Image: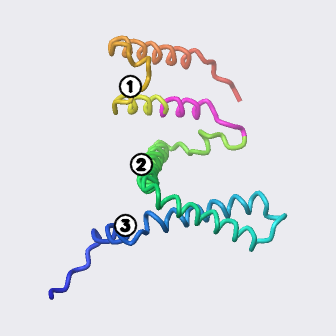
């Protein structure tokens, strides 16, 4: 009998066959969420052992639910992958801001609230998100997407020109 080499590619199927993704990980996630929520809401009013017991019982109900509904695993897998993509995008944006010498605290504004540059960055990111949404075929979900592509392009150009005119007409405050 030949000895099989250890391969990292064999780990996810092994964990899936063992039920780690379907039962254990949702159980642990639910346990942490229930415990944290109960501890935050009732930390001073109920003993820690009671909070732990309630959290454990609710987490076992979540495990029971995942045995009936295997789509929970698909949901968490998709959510985890999407969260990784969003976090990577945010990290790249922060790196580009750093390359241009802009600190994220300056855009967010700290205690003063979001600055104009922060709002501009938020609008630009939302615009890029909308473009990605429509580019990925999400336009069929929006009734306004029934407009012709020429009209949509004209509306986008008019909005960009209006924003540029507004930005150029702003008077700079002397501090």
Magenta span of residues: 112-125
Residue 95: x and y, percent? 46, 48
Q: Which residue is mark 3?
A: 16
Q: Earlier in the sequence, mark 1 or mark 2?
A: 2
Q: Which residue is mark 2?
A: 85
Q: Dot 1: within a 10 Å radius of its alpha carbon, few (fewer than 14), some, or many (20 or more) residues?
A: some
**Which quarter shows the N terminus?**
bottom left
Q: Do we see residue 99 in this rendering? A: no
What secondary structure is marked by label 1?
A: helix
Q: Which residue is mark 1?
A: 139
117 or 11: nearer the viewer: 11
Our reading of the magenta stretch's main secondary structure is helix
Residue appearing at x 77%, y 57% in the figure: 41
| Magenta stretch holds residue 61 | no
- Mark 2 near mark 3, Cβ–Cβ under 8 Å? no
What secondary structure is marked by label 3?
A: helix
**Cα separation between marks 1 and 2:** 21 Å
């Amino acid at each position: 009998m030949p000895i099989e080499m250890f391969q990292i590619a064999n780990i996810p199927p092994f964990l899936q066959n063992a039920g780690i993704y379907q039962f254990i990980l949702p159980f642990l996630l639910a346990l942490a969420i229930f415990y944290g929520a109960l501890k935050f809401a009732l930390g001073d009013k109920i003993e820690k052992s009671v909070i732990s017991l309630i959290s454990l019982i609710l987490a076992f109900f979540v495990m029971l639910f995942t045995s009936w509904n295997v789509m929970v695993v698909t949901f968490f897998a998709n959510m985890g992958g999407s969260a990784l993509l969003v976090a990577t995008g945010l990290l790249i944006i922060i790196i580009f801001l750093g390359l241009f010498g802009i600190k994220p605290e300056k855009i967010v504004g700290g205690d003063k609230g979001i600055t104009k540059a922060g709002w501009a960055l938020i609008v630009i990111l939302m615009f890029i998100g909308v473009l990605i949404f429509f580019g990925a075929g999400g336009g069929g979900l929006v009734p306004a997407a029934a407009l012709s592509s020429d009209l949509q392009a004209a509306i986008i150009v008019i909005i960009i020109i209006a924003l540029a005119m507004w930005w150029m007409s702003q008077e700079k405050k002397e501090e």
